[in-house]
Amino acid sequence: MPNKIVVAVTGASGAVYAKVLLDKLMQAKEQWQELSVVMSNNAKEVWQTELNNDSYKNYAVRYFEKNDFSAPFASGSAKYNIMIVAPCSMGTLGRIASGVSDDLVTRAADVMLKERRKLILMVRETPYNLIHIKNMETVTLAGGIICPATPSFYSQPKTVEDIAATVVDRVLDLAGIDIKSFRWGK
């Protein structure tokens, strides 16, 4: 059965990660049945600031407002099996780690953890403080995957999007989405 995926975009710097992730998911349509997106207001503002556009509106996906608790992925019965938060702010990480389901992003993350489904957080902050590290530990112990927005350079990326793709490709690998990507040793 194809995947049901929710992508959450928070207000952390790194809108290019969300853009590249959505672009690559659109190229892998045969691997998902549903793709839903929830963005915070800050995420929309950061996208506009960093990418100078509002192209997040142009993807053929289902959009949900961050306080729409009637979204299907707010319940385990909808059987969404992958959630990717890209980028994931430290505030969002902290609320997820604490079990505070005060918006659709944190509620959906809570559902993924309780149902033992894939939750991948592309955390975006530097440096980390001890609270960040302990929150990452808590989410990891609960079954989530922390994938920091730390690019690699093996593939000799040429553009900002190429650099972002080095992280997004790892996230998609972790999610079980089959993509063409640079592979070490090939």
Image: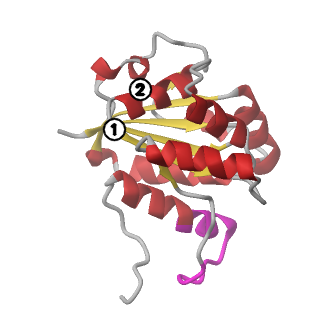
Of labels 1 and 2, earlier in sequence is 2
Res. 113 visible in picture: yes
Q: What residue type is labelled 2?
A: Val
Q: What element carries label 1?
A: loop
As drawn, the residue found furthest toward the bottom would be: 185
Q: Position of residue 164 (x, y in %)?
A: 61, 63
Front in this rendered view, residue 7 or 101: 101
- In the image, what residue occupies the spot 82% across and 44% down? 49
Q: Quadrant of the C terminus?
A: bottom left
Residue 111 is labelled as 2
Quadrant of residue 93 within the rendered picture: top right
Quadrant of residue 53 within the rendered picture: top right
Q: Position of residue 107 (x, y in %)?
A: 51, 22
- In the image, what residue occupies the spot 33% across and 38% down? 117
- Say if the magenta span includes residue 160: yes
Front in this rendered view, residue 157 or 124: 124
Bounds of the magenta segment: 153-166
As drawn, the residue found furthest toward the right would be: 49
- The answer to whether 91 is drawn above or below residue 67 in the figure is below
Q: Position of residue 163 (x, y in %)?
A: 62, 69
